[in-house]
């Protein structure tokens, strides 16, 4: 079967000076949830705009479900739902009108029932018959996500889905993504919110300055690019020398620094839950009364910071 | 999933484009202007103690407002049609659907055309109804004048769409459309008239047929002398006017379509 998304040396030049994409290639298999991570101006929206037929690549090809987006836009987009940048809607239409309009274009069966379902899903049911003209940014974003799911597409492309949402809205989007993942959808989500990606994505594509720096599972990326980790430990009692030696003699520990008696800074090797668990158990075994155990940063953040600097 | 035919999509797009006019203010502004013109015609002569003009004069009175009404219509109904989506970001939603660009373009153009033609027809119906009420008759030429007005509007609408696909802001597009049809073409026309040249390639010069068709015999192009000046008073024939309108319409629409399908949403 053709991959859900396939990019072949995609290049986009906006002007003589701005080369937004420098020949990126990537394949996303069906059922995967891929985070598309990169700093501002990395080329995330540019890639997504090419994928959704809003702009043309200067060079290269893009396929959705095996269909060339340039040659056959209508078929390529038929099983795709997307939110690009901050979508806006016709102010003279209500959410129900908007979804009816889009549903008719896409040929959604049993449209009225589906619209009700969608509005409930994105929590806009109380605004169903209010014209979009009066909507806040976050409400428009919700409607944007709703319309992307309207026709129950197999592939969902989201460009910064939580932009403009309040903390509760962000959590709801995260849960929604996890739910879609469970339903077996293919998801391609751009973001610069590391935590959002880490909590949802199986795989991460790191993009910077128009180039894919890495494309792998979150775990593999951690292993590959970051072997030494740091953890800050707070203890109830000052650490004794014997305890300190016991910690230092543990296999994975590289270095230990003690700050004002009750705080330990431990550098250790290995990026996995198992390693941290072993370390924590080692601390207990040494009789240290651990009151706080904070690994420094998220695994992904470390990789991300390392790669884009 | 989604084997909706292009034709069904076209109908959907047209329906919602027309809903835009119905729910927006612009249509009602134009309808109010038509109401004011009609009210002025009915109320002013009695107030001044003057008699109403005859049937030809009645339709002629209304026909003098048609040109400016058409410029207003294309500015209000056509100028922002495409540029709005790109300026406001509504294209991020509509244009990422499994629908061809040409279907969107056709939907927008046809609905602007239909609503505009409807408004022009309504204007003539009002004129004819008033003539019937006052004079008991309306000349058959009213219908010809209306058809020419609609043809003229279609030509201007095509050029308007070209501007709408070219400009980056709705305001700029509206200002340019209005200024171009209201001033620029007429200035060219005026200069050519002073030079004694026939402005047959100026689209706005063709609008005279809308009134001329009501006059019998059909007015002829003449040179009028003002002392040493000789000014051309140009009256294109219906055939010339329709040909020029068709040329402008086809060229404007062709270029607009070409730009539209290639337009990028940056
Ligand atoms: N319309 C445009 N004209 C010129 N350059 C552009 C245009 N849009 C984007 N760019 C440039 O292309 C590059 C990639 O931009 P893009 O919007 O794809 O980044 P992004 O990864 O989505 O960033 P962000 O996280 O800020 O949304 C940037 O250097 C940007 O300046
Ligand atoms: Mg972006």
Image (cartoon, rainbow, N blue to C red):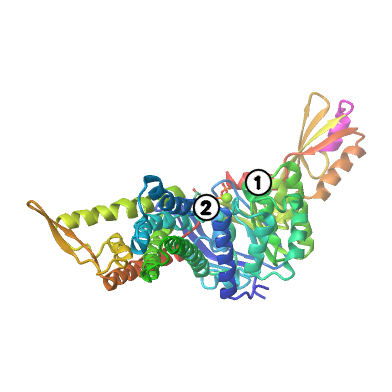
Residue sitting nearer the eye, B82 or A253: B82
Q: Mark 2 points at which residue?
A: B28
Residue sitting nearer the eye, B74 or A292: B74
- Cβ atoms under marks 2 and 1 closer than 8 Å: no
Name the residue rendered at 42%, 51% in the picture: B174
Mark 2, Cα crowd under 10 Å, few <14 / some 14-19 / many 20+, is: few
Q: Secondary structure under badge 1?
A: loop
Mark 1, Cα crowd under 10 Å, few <14 / some 14-19 / many 20+, is: some
Name the residue rendered at 31%, 63% in the picture: B211
Residue sitting nearer the eye, B206 or B36: B36
Name the residue rendered at 29%, 69% in the picture: B241
Same subunit, tags 2 and 1: no
In the current view of this chain or complex, which residue is farthest to the left?
B228
Q: Measure how far apart labels 2 and 1 are at the Cα level.
A: 25 Å
Residue B66, horizontal then vertical, whole percent: 38, 58
Q: In this view, does B228 lie to the left or right of B208?
A: left
Q: Tell me which segment is drawn in magenta.
A: A236-248
**Mark 2 or 1, which is nearer the eye?**
2
Name the residue rendered at 74%, 53% in the picture: A122
Q: Mark 1 points at which residue?
A: A135
> Is residue A278 in the magenta section?
no
**Image label count:** 2
Rendered image quadrant of residue B130: bottom left
């Amino acid at each position: 079967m053709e991959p859900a998304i396939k990019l072949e040396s995609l290049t986009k030049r906006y002007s003589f000076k701005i080369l937004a994409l420098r020949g990126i290639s990537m394949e996303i298999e069906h059922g995967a949830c891929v985070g598309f991570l990169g700093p501002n101006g990395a080329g995330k929206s540019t890639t997504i705009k090419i994928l959704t037929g809003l702009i043309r690549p200067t060079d290269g090809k893009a396929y959705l479900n095996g269909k060339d987006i340039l040659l056959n836009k209508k078929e390529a987009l038929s099983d795709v739902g997307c939110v690009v940048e901050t979508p806006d809607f016709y102010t003279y239409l209500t959410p129900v009108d908007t979804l009816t309009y889009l549903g008719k274009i896409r040929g959604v069966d049993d449209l009225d029932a589906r619209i009700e379902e969608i509005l409930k899903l994105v929590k806009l049911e109380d605004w169903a018959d209010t014209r979009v003209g009066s909507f806040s940014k976050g409400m428009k974003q919700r409607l944007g996500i709703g319309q992307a799911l309207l026709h129950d597409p197999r592939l969902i492309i989201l460009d910064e889905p939580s932009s403009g949402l309040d903390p509760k809205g962000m959590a709801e989007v995260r849960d929604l993504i996890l739910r879609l993942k469970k339903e077996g959808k293919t998801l391609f989500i751009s973001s610069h919110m590391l935590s959002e990606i880490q909590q949802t994505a199986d795989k991460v594509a790191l993009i910077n300055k128009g180039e894919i720096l890495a494309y792998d599972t979150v775990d593999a990326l951690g292993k590959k690019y970051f072997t030494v980790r740091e953890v800050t430990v707070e203890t109830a009692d000052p650490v004794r020398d014997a305890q300190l030696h016991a910690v230092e003699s543990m296999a994975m520990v590289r270095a230990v620094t003690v700050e004002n008696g009750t705080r330990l800074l431990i550098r250790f090797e290995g990026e996995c839950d198992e390693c941290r668990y072993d370390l924590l158990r080692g601390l207990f075994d040494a009789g240290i009364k651990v009151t706080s155990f904070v690994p420094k940063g998220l695994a992904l953040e470390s990789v991300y910071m390392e790669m884009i600097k | 999933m989604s084997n909706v035919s292009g034709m069904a999509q076209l109908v959907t797009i047209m329906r919602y484009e027309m809903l835009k006019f119905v729910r927006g203010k612009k249509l009602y502004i134009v309808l109010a202007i038509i109401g004011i013109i009609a009210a002025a015609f009915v109320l002013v002569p009695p107030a001044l103690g003057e008699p109403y003009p005859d049937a030809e004069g009645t339709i002629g009175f209304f026909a003098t407002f048609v040109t400016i009404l058409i410029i207003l219509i294309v500015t209000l109904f056509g100028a922002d049609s495409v540029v709005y989506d790109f300026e406001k970001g509504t294209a991020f939603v509509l244009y990422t659907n499994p629908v061809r660009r040409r279907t969107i373009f056709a939907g927008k153009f046809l609905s602007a055309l239909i609503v505009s033609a409807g408004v022009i027809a309504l204007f003539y119906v009002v004129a004819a109804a008033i003539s019937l009420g006052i004079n008991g008759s309306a000349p058959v030429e009213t219908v010809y004048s209306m058809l020419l007005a609609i043809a003229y509007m279609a030509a201007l609408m095509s050029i308007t769409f070209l501007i709408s696909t070219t400009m980056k802001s709705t305001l700029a597009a509206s200002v340019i459309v209005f200024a171009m049809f209201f001033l620029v073409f007429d200035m060219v026309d005026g200069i050519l008239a002073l030079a004694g040249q026939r402005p047959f390639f100026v689209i706005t010069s063709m609008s005279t047929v809308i009134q001329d068709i009501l006059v019998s015999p059909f007015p002829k192009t003449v040179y009028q002398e003002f002392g040493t000046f000789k000014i051309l008073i140009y009256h294109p024939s219906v055939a010339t006017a329709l040909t020029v309108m068709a040329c402008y319409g086809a060229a404007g629409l062709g270029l607009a379509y070409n730009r539209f399908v290639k337009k990028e949403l940056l």
